[in-house]
Image: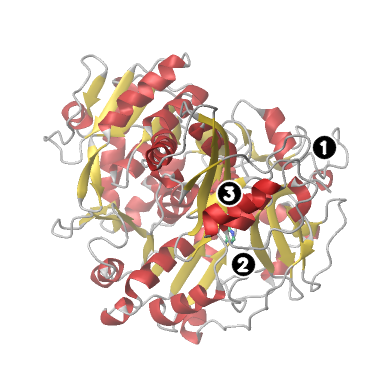
């Protein structure tokens, strides 16, 4: 067995938890309470069962073929259909809901009032923005545009304006560096960058425009010219960045928009299989992958999941605390909730600013009844203010956890203290690639089990395989590679401009016949290790490959290591995942130096700075250890597993087969003593 797939199947030592049952008043109002739904979505009814998903949308032209597998494994859903995503999130709601709040914008500074944007107002702003993008920026259907926008209403407005025109948006998380943004501009081939001058984070106005200049430069170095940079201003009429505008390239949106006042742009009717957006995500090696999501399949999928897993009704106030710069925000702040005419909350800042009572004050003020966040945020709020929720008068009917496995201990705090033992919790397992949820309980149907995501959702058929492709039986406490047997409408279509990598990464391992156009021959390999349980639930253990999941978001080990290697003195770098009580996982970085250099605190600091400059703060290592040498196999491979054991204070095990066994004890002393 190689080092890499050592985690593919093994015994797992955790105790299964008992069930918690959904409260009767939740079940009484739930969008789905009928257990026979699983029969309706059984494999015998595949793919026709997904008609129900499509029927949540307005189609300009109804589709004729539900699933076309002729170009396997690039699946085409709802072929022949035409629609527009912006129309589905806005226009069709105006008759019934024009005066209803679409977006509650909560600025980070508490003294700034919350903004309530109605569907009518959102419709107007999206149309004017679309007019500007078309007539001023020259964008048209099929063009890519990179967004590097923080959490303000201008982000969903820009996304929907793009969707209205058929322009493919590629939003880069605002916390990412200018360089990371530039790489994604280059890969997507964007000629326009849309950004903001600044935004608030922990009470400080950040200079965000600075990153736009870096991004444009980085893209240019790689041969991609950005012709226009469009800048939303956090405060219209006032420029909040110290970084000057570049004449002829940079334009402030609020100065251009008055020319488009009142303009209505007919939504462009597009084939279901056209691309709605790209979302970049890290893999174990190589550059970030542009996950390509379709209009019809994706939008129908996130609508269905929002309705039945998030249990959103139009009268609900729904708050997903993720960032729209990640897939969670695309699917479950913007597209899913707006397609259902919900009121969705956009919060600008950090959850614990100015104090850990903030989320609960927001929930109280807006009467939020559906709450969605990650284990990292839950751990952070618990640590900073475990009793805070009790001080506020809010009541959730439904809560979500997403992004990484949640410890049962933390789950129970979420349930009892945040949920006041009266809300249902869904632990939703999915990925950037999958568009929407794969495994979770259906909140009005299945009981909850702390630490376990739940069974495959209706229409999703998971299977857990060992390295030889044998199914791991349920209830034996063994883990394997979790795969999905069948395609589903929300799945990404391919990796942008890299079909080969798409096939290799997600399908090659278990594909029975690479020439086959039968979907049964193409199980989807998610890349996570999971344990199948007796009751059909799965417990997700984490990534099987070399990806580090920080705060619920993936960072490639290779990306971090190559950033560290930018420091002149660094010879080798190895990054490992360390368990942290609050953050879940943080990266520890081990580096060795080129000859002639001595270790120093200053140098360790420089490495850490460089990593966060290149990739963004999210990648900042917990520790940087400068070691004399890396533990290596005889073939010269760095043994990350050993470094990880040291960082996590686990037993290192047998090291006698290493090329340099003595180094292990030396590093252990350095780190632990
Ligand atoms: C990876 C995907 C899904 C949106 C946010 C992250 C891990 C995700 C869970 C969960 C255990 C989870 C997996 C997955 N993950 N949700 N409920 N329980 N692990 O999206 O950056 O594409 O990361 O996050 O390891 O593969 P992403």
Q: SS of the residue at dot 2? A: loop
Please report the residue visible at 74 percent of the width from the left and 55 percent of the height from the top: 7
Name the spot of residue 562 as percent of width and height, x first: 54, 32
The quadrant holding residue 256 is top left
Task: Indicate which label's residue lies in the foreground, 3 or 1.
Answer: 3
Q: Residues within 10 Å of mark 1 (few under 14, many from 20)?
A: some
Q: Residues within 10 Å of mark 2 (few under 14, many from 20)?
A: many
Closer to the camera in the image, 67 or 104: 104
Q: Residues within 10 Å of mark 3 (few under 14, many from 20)?
A: many
The quadrant holding residue 8 is bottom right
Name the spot of residue 254 as percent of width and height, x first: 18, 32
Please report the residue visible at 37 percent of the width from the left and 45 percent of the height from the top: 91
The quadrant holding residue 510 is top right
Please report the residue visible at 37 percent of the width from the left and 68 percent of the height from the top: 381
Location of mark 2 (residue)? 453
Q: Marks 2 and 1, how far apart in space?
A: 31 Å
Name the spot of residue 583 as percent of width and height, x first: 46, 60
The colour style of the image is secondary structure
Is the shortest distance between ligand 1 and the CB of mark 2 under 8 Å? yes
Q: Marks 2 and 3, how far apart in space?
A: 25 Å
Find out whether the residues at labels 3 and 1 contact each other: C-beta distance under 8 Å: no
Quadrant observed for ligand 1 in the rendered image = bottom right
Residue 240 vs 252, above or below: the answer is below
Nearer the N terminus, badge 3 or badge 1? 1
Nearer the N terminus, badge 2 or badge 1? 2
Location of mark 1 (residue)? 517
Location of mark 3 (residue)? 576
Is 598 situated left or right of 209 in this image?
Answer: right
Would residue 369 be seen by someone viewing this image from the given angle?
A: no
Is 87 situated left or right of 274 in this image?
Answer: left
Task: Indicate which label's residue lies in the foreground, 2 or 1.
Answer: 2
Is 312 situated left or right of 98 in this image?
Answer: right
């Amino acid at each position: 067995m190689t080092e890499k797939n050592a985690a593919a199947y093994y015994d797992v030592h955790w105790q299964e938890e008992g069930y918690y049952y959904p409260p009767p008043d939740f079940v009484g109002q739930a969008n789905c309470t009928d257990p026979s739904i699983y029969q309706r979505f059984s494999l015998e009814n595949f793919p026709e069962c997904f008609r129900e998903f499509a029927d949540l949308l307005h189609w300009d032209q109804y589709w004729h073929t539900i699933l076309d597998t002729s170009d396997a494994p690039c699946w085409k859903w709802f072929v022949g259909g035409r629609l527009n995503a912006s129309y589905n999130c806005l226009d069709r709601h105006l008759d019934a809901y024009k005066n209803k709040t679409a977006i509650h914008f909560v600025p980070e500074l508490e003294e700034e009032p919350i903004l309530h944007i109605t569907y009518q107002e959102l419709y107007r702003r999206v149309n004017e923005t679309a007019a500007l993008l078309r007539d001023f920026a020259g964008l048209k259907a099929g063009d890519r545009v990179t967004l590097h926008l923080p959490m303000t209403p201008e982000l969903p407005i820009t996304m929907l304006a793009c969707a209205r025109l058929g322009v493919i948006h590629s939003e880069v998380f605002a916390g990412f560096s200018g360089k990371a943004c530039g790489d994604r501009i280059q890969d997507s081939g964007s000629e326009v960058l849309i950004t903001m001058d600044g935004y608030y984070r922990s009470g400080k106005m950040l200079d965000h425009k600075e990153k736009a200049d870096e991004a444009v430069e980085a893209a240019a170095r790689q041969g991609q010219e950005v012709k226009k940079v469009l800048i939303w201003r956090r405060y219209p009429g006032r420029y909040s960045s110290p970084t000057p505008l570049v004449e002829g390239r940079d334009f402030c949106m609020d100065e251009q928009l008055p020319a488009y006042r009142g303009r209505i742009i007919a939504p462009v009717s597009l084939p279901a299989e056209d691309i709605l957006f790209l979302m970049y995500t890290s893999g174990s090696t190589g550059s970030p992958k542009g996950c390509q999501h379709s209009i019809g399949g994706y939008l129908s999928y996130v609508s269905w999941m929002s309705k039945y897993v998030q249990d959103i009704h139009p009268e609900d106030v729904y708050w997903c605390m993720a960032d729209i710069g990640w897939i969670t925000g695309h699917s479950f702040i913007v597209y899913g909730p707006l397609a259902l005419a919900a009121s969705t909350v956009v919060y600008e800042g950090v959850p614990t600013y100015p104090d850990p009572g903030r989320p609960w004050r927001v929930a109280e003020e807006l009467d939020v009844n559906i709450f969605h966040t990650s284990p990292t945020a839950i751990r952070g709020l618990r640590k900073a203010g475990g009793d805070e929720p009790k001080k506020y008068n809010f009541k959730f009917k439904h809560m979500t956890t997403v992004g990484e496995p949640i410890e049962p201990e933390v789950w129970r705090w979420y349930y009892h203290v945040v949920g006041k033992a009266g809300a249902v919790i869904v632990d939703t397992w999915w990925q950037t690639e999958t568009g929407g949820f794969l495994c979770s309980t259906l909140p009005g149907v299945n009981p909850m089990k702390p630490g376990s995501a739940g069974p495959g959702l209706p229409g999703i058929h998971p299977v857990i395989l060992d390295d030889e492709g044998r199914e791991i039986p349920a209830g034996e406490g063994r883990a394997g590679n979790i795969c999905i047997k069948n395609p589903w409408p929300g799945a990404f279509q391919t990796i942008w401009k890299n079909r080969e990598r798409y096939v290799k990464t997600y399908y090659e391992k278990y594909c029975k016949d690479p020439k086959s156009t039968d979907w049964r021959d193409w199980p989807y390999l998610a890349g996570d290790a999971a344990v199948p349980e007796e009751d059909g639930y799965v417990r997700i253990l984490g990534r099987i490959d070399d990806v580090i999941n920080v705060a619920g978001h993936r960072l490639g080990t290779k990306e971090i290591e190559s950033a560290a290697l930018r420091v002149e003195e660094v010879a080798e770098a190895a990054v490992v995942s360390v368990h942290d009580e609050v953050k879940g996982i943080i990266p520890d970085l081990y580096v060795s130096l080129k000859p002639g250099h001595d270790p120093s605190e200053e140098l360790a600091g420089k490495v850490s700075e460089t990593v966060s400059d290149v990739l963004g703060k999210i990648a900042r290592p917990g520790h940087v250890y400068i070691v004399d040498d890396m533990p290596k196999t005889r073939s010269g491979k760095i043994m990350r597993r050993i470094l990880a054991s040291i960082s996590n204070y686990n037993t290192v095990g047998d090291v006698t087969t290493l090329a340099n066994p003595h180094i292990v004890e030396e590093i252990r002393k350095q780190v632990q003593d």
